Amino acid sequence: MVETGAHWDCFGDQIQVSTNPNPGKSPVAYVHPSKYVDYKINNDLKTAQRCIDLLDEAGYNVSGNDTFDWIHDTYLILIRMFPNGCPPSTLISMNARYDPHFHMKVGSTLRQLRKENYLIIGTGGAVHNLYRNRWAPMLRFRDNFAQDSPPEHWALEFRQSVEDVFLKTSGPQLRRAMTRLMKHPEYRDAHATDDHFMAAMFVAGAAGDFEDEGTPAILATETWELTNMCNSQFTIGSWPKVAA
């Protein structure tokens, strides 16, 4: 599995790949440590080196980082997806310039791994603006899913546009549509900063080649938290079904 998230970025023109053989986990605010502290991350060093080699061949200023501890944007989803144990996983950083085309090309460079049955994951957020969230239920009751009112119009509008791009486009059209979302009238309300949208660019690069035209996508699950923050989980493509 190869993953990029929304909380690890590098300055200049750099990107890095996690090569820490035993990465720790950064604490999660408002979440009891018992929910994540005992989950061991299985950092796949062999695939990490392969990703470094592929990105280096493509001209990226890329290096390994053997001290980086994983952050909740990446390990919490592994706990939910694979509660019985972490599969071999490789983590790629973002670049702090947040150039959508840069991150799309990173995904495109690594897309060949999909043909070898690697799962490629981008974990960010469909709507993620901490300044526009409503924090009172979390602060008072430790309940981030409490909603005493619906999400605001700007959040619903942008969330719907994200769904339309994933479900109604494919191939290079997916890549074009995903980058255009950053010019959406509601984009800056939905994303005060660009960090949580670069994972979508990474995925569009990995699943947006001409070979991917017509590949179906599904919206598998979704949560709203803190009233205006939307986490939408899309899946592009599938593995052949195998009898258990």
Image (cartoon, helix red, strand yellow):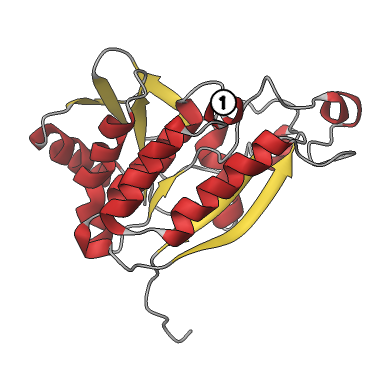
Vertical side of 203 occupied by 65: above or below? above
Name the residue rendered at 87%, 30% in the picture.
137
How crowded pointer 1 is (Cα within 10 Å; few <14, some 14-19, many 20+) is rated as: some
* Residue 178 point in image, percent of width and height: 39, 43
Image label count: 1
Residue, far front: 185
Q: Left or right: where does residue 144 sit relative to residue 81?
A: right
* Residue 183 point in image, percent of width and height: 44, 31
Name the residue rendered at 59%, 49% in the picture.
160
Residue 78 seen in the current view: no
Q: Secondary structure at mark 1?
A: loop
Vertical side of 48 occupied by 130: above or below? above
- Near-viewer residue (216 or 121): 216
Name the residue rendered at 8%, 36% in the picture.
57
For residue 73, which quarter of the picture?
A: top right
Residue 176 seen in the current view: yes
Q: Left or right: where does residue 57 sit relative to residue 65?
A: left
* Residue 111 point in image, percent of width and height: 24, 52
* Residue 99 point in image, percent of width and height: 32, 25
For residue 220, which quarter of the picture?
A: bottom right
Vertical side of 134 occupied by 244: above or below? below
- Near-viewer residue (122 or 161): 161
For residue 145, which quarter of the picture?
A: top right
Residue underneath mark 1: 26
Name the residue rendered at 47%, 42% in the picture.
41
Residue, far top: 12
Looking at the picture, which amino acid does disc 1 mark?
Ser
